[in-house]
Image (tube, rainbow, N blue to C red):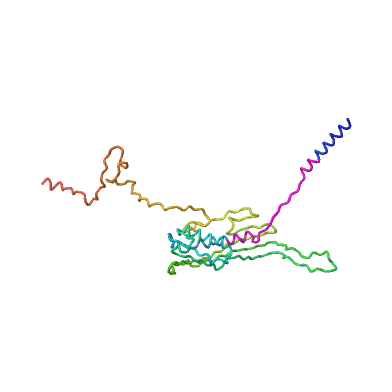
Amino acid sequence: MATHLNRNCTTIWLAAAACAAASLGCGTTRSSNTARTATEQLLISDAIDRTVQQINFKALDGQTIYFDERPLAEVVDKGYLISSIRQHLLASGCILKDARDQADYVIEPRVGAMGTDSHDLLFGIPAVQVPQVPLAPSMPSSIPEIPFAKRRDQRGIAKLAVFAYRRESGEPVWQSGLALSESVAKDIWLFGAGPFQRGTIYDGTRFLGICIKDHDEDETNISRVASLTEEAVFGKKKPPTAPDHPGGVMQASAEQTAAEQPRDGAAVLPPPRPLAEAPKTEDPAKTAG
């Protein structure tokens, strides 16, 4: 009997230990940072979108184009820039060719600026390095900053120009002029709370990544062609439709086919003649005389 009780107690203790082990646990999360911050990449890509959108390629609508990428070999984020320009060319009606000898025109771009910079402003006590004293080794080596208010402004700039010439003769055909755009990101901390984020790379005002105010869209900025940042479907142009007749009345035509004629057997009348060709009525007084 005692042996049976000991076995039951052992089973209970093992079950309790298993439940305790199941209720306690630990885990680790691995995090890493890329060589370039996401904010920097967003600033540059946003500046590229805004700059490329300013260029009007409609002068080359319907023409075969070879896009010369060689001047962009040393540009930051050249892959995104090249793809954005090619997309904008297609949206403007141009026909892109992969081989130079298959196109009638050559487009060559150049970049004057492509990069980011930042500016920091602090209201409070900045970080201070404390000199080490041999007699007081327990003193801290540095004092962290104590900000009451802090602001960081970052911006990305893109400057672009494009020109086109005839492939065979080298004659100039078109040039875009300079296109310059700037994207911004502003972070604010107040008494240690933040950052409050605003700028062109955000949809509105954000706090810790959460949108607290929607962005007011500028309805006056209407693109000439499809926007780079919006979905668009390209297809064949529809044939022009006949203009609507006033009052919704359409003249009958004597050249209608049998399928187009009314099914009730009514005759198809010729189009009415203008009033100038109508027969003139005689004066009743002259007729009676």
Q: Position of residue 109 (x, y in %)?
A: 51, 66
Q: Residue at x 78, y 67 (%)?
A: 130
Quick check: is 33 in the magenta stretch? Answer: yes
The residue lying furthest to the left in this view is 289
Q: Which residues are magenta?
A: 17-44
Q: Is residue 130 above or below residue 288?
A: below
Which of these two is toward me, 170 or 50?
170
Which of these two is toward me, 81 or 144?
81
Asked where in the image residue 118 lies, by quadrant, the reply is bottom right
Q: Would residue 217 appear left or right of 141 to someone viewing this image?
A: left
Count every numbered label the image shows and give the total: 0
Q: Would residue 265 appear left or right of 133 to someone viewing this image?
A: left
Q: Position of residue 23 (x, y in %)?
A: 76, 43
Which of these two is toward me, 225 or 86?
86
Q: Position of residue 190 (x, y in %)?
A: 67, 59
Quick check: is 97 in the magenta stretch? Answer: no
Q: Residue at x 60, y 60 (%)?
A: 41
Which of these two is toward me, 70 or 216?
70
Q: Would residue 100 appear left or right of 73 to someone viewing this image?
A: left
Q: Is residue 228 above or below residue 175?
A: above
| Quadrant into which the N terminus falls | top right
Q: Position of residue 56 (x, y in %)?
A: 47, 62
Q: Residue at x 31, y 46 (%)?
A: 250
Q: Would residue 263 appear left or right of 131 to someone viewing this image?
A: left
Q: Residue at x 83, y 65 (%)?
A: 137
The residue lying furthest to the top in this view is 1
